[in-house]
Image: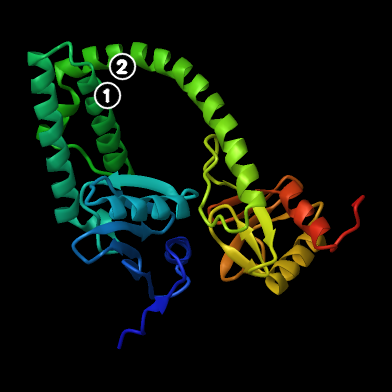
Amino acid sequence: MRPPAKNYSNHQNCAHAWAHQLSPNGHASNLYFEGSTIFSYGSHFPIATLVENRVFFTTEGYSVSTSKHKCRVLSAVSHLKIVYVKHVPLGTDPASDQSFIRKNIEDWISEIQHLISTLERYPRRLSLLREIDYLLSLLRTFIDELGVTPDHHLQQVLDHPSLNAIAELNAARKLKAAKAEQKRLALLTKIFTGLLKAWKSDLGNNGSLQNPIDSNLAYLRWNDNTNCVETSKGIQVPLEVAKKCFDFLHSVLPEGCSDCNFRLMGFQINSVSPEYLIVGCHKIAMNEVTDIARELEWIGPGA
């Protein structure tokens, strides 16, 4: 008999619980997981499946609320290898599921061939280059991750004469895009700095934040209202649990540890160093931990 689903207080907690398999199944409103697969609204829309250190994550969409579910889930597995798929596997051994492999490859081939045909008719539609390049990267990652040997049909698509010209055009486009991306990230970083400051000071702001440079970077604040140390990814750590974690960190530093013998609310601490504490998708700078410890008077002002 399947155990009852555990109820989580919000989507972030539910997604993190699934990512770390803290319970066999659980839910938060219309986001729920059963074993290694997490769903939006129902079994008709699996978002992702965990397979060891990889996540098979859907490229499909359904609604605005499902898009929000996908963002929560993606944030929770940002520390794992993401393999994007059109059809999410429901088993834990996708490499042996020929139906799953065939459906994904056939759908990508069909889309790529359609886009190539459209580009040949409308060569000035440069947006098609991005779409083709994106789908090719997904397809190649998929066959590499699953160890698929391309058959004749797939190899024909991968060796299509148009793809060489597309690759050359994309190389020039990417160089230009990289420069634009630097400017964009500089602007986003400036905006993020303001949002982070607001989040730290406004204890009623329960939204999650994502660093534009490193999505795993997480930040901390103390909330008197909840009596918790809260992370910018939406996780709440009760005071007594946070203190035990701090004592553990204090005991292993400055040497640190990897695959540490300590779990924080069920989450395995991956590593501790003088620079960072890494717990799943949380990469927390030690100065954040020190600031909290000072605020709670676990250490003195000069420590």
Q: Nearer the viewer, residue 8 or 282?
A: 8
Residue 6 coordinates in the image, percent (x, y):
41, 78
Q: Secondary structure at mark 2?
A: helix
Q: Nearer the viewer, residue 201 or 228?
A: 201
The residue drawn where x is 22% and y is 12% is 165
Label 1 near label 2: C-beta < 8 Å? yes
Q: Secondary structure at mark 1?
A: helix
Residue 22 coordinates in the image, percent (x, y):
48, 71
**Precedes in sequence: disc 2 or disc 1:** 1
Q: Which residue is mark 2?
A: 170
| Mark number displayed over residue 130 | 1
| Amino acid identity at mark 2 | Asn
Q: Mark 2 and mark 1: span between their CA atoms?
A: 7 Å
To which quarter of the image does residue 122 belong? top left
Using the rendered image of the protein, determine whether residue 243 is visible from the camera's viewpoint. Answer: yes
| Amino acid identity at mark 1 | Arg
| Mark number displayed over residue 29 | none
Residue 9 coordinates in the image, percent (x, y):
47, 70
